[in-house]
Amino acid sequence: MFPRTIEKEIIELISDTPVIALLGPRQVGKTTLVKQLATQFPHPSIYLDLESDTDLNRLRDAELYLGEREESTIIIDEIQRMPSLFPLLRSLIDKKRMPGRFVLLGSASPDLLKNSSETLAGRISYLELHPLTLEEVKEQISYREHWLRGGFPDVLQAASDNAAFRKMGDFISTYLERDLPLMGIPASPRDMRLLMNMLVSVHGSLLNVSQLANSLKMSVPTVQNYLGYLENAFLIRRLQPWFVNISKRLVKTPKLYIRDSGMLHSLAGITDSEELAGNILLGNSWEGYVIQQVIAGLPYNIQPYFYRTQDGAELDLVLVKGNNVKVAIEIKYTNSPVLSRGNTLAQEDLGSPPLLVVTPSAEDYNMRENVLVCNIGTLAGHLERLAR
């Protein structure tokens, strides 16, 4: 098992907060990680899986069962299956407030986020477990393999590329045919698959919901709802534009990315590095891959955006703390990058923050003042220094 960078934060929060919610897509490793860390929790732990009939039976009288175990850390997996628990958890915490009473694991849903935020305000801390990042696996796995397969543990560690993409295909099918109905989401598996396949072609592009709806012969509200389901399940990202500078004619439409590169490649029918190298998707895939690596490693108080004006100034990522741009990022799939005039104008528009130009494997060097070329392997170290 790969060590996860989030481990330290989990241990710190569980020693200070009554409830921790660890959210992320299914099969990303939430259960494995929490069980591994349970020996470091402040109280003995009890694990309950809401997809287990046995554990559901234990919670037939949840107030009695949980109330009698107030000296334990109760780990509740797939919490979105039972949103009715949230008011009870609040009541139990208010009767006896102590750190580490509950650890909630969820694959996310509108109900999960809505109920927990309303009923556990001031009592809960949220953490997101992303798919494995390059920083977490680079001692054992090359960036090329990680980029191809993505960061879902079972897919990444499969014996071959063929086995990896079979696993990813099974994951997508299970999500559409089983997990959506279990979360109470009224989405047609067929229509959702059509949408996911269509999203491959707009990955890394400005999101035009009307165009998607027309192409899929669906209504705009239906497509908007389906995108919301995918976003709440941590499968896609709508990256918002940064538009504090009101004097500029700025693009205000989000860009869409399929978060995990392995999922993107599976949906595109790409199953090995040679197919990826010859695919028209190559550049946008690399861009989305780097963006996922950056965002997965950001501290909670740094927010990611992109920057684009209607006059052609553009940068792929802008990392912001409060209203201050800490660092900008431009992503290039070449080891001999050249900045466009639009990149330079964008950096100037933003107040000339440090600019990282991310390449596959170029040696780090200063392109010019406040512009550093780096590679995907050294990127995390530079962000540690600049984006704090």
Image (tube, rainbow, N blue to C red):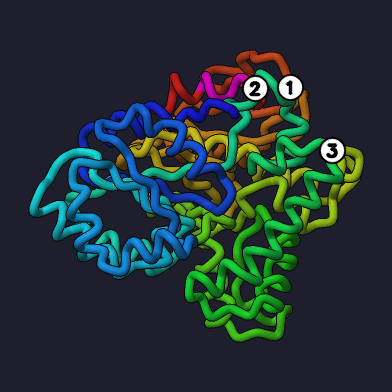
Where disc 1 sits, the SS reads loop
Q: Please report whichever mark, 2 or 1, sits nearer to the chain's N-terminal start.
A: 1
Please identify the residue farthest to the left as the structure is shown.
Answer: 95
Give how far across and how far down residue 68 sits, in percent. Answer: 18, 52
Give how far across and how far down residue 317 sits, in percent. Answer: 54, 41
Quadrant of the rendering where the N terminus is positioned: top right
Q: Which residue is mark 3?
A: 160
In the foreground, 383 or 105:
105
Mark 2–mark 3 Cα distance, whole angstroms, equals: 23 Å
Q: Which mark is residue 377?
A: 2
Residue 59 in sight in this render: yes
Give how far across and how far down residue 316 sits, in percent. Answer: 59, 42
Q: Amino acid at mark 1?
A: Ser
Q: Nearer the viewer, mark 2 or mark 1?
A: 2
Residue 239, placed above or below residue 213: above
Q: Nearer the viewer, mark 1 or mark 3?
A: 3
Membership of 380 in magenta stretch: yes
Residue segment shown in magenta: 378-382
Q: Which residue is mark 1?
A: 361
Residue 119 in sight in this render: no
Mark 2–mark 1 Cα distance, whole angstroms, equals: 7 Å
In-image side of 312 versus 97 (left or right): right
| Residue under the point 48% across and 44% down | 31
Q: Amino acid at mark 3?
A: Ser
Residues at discs 2 and 1 in contact (Cβ within 8 Å): yes
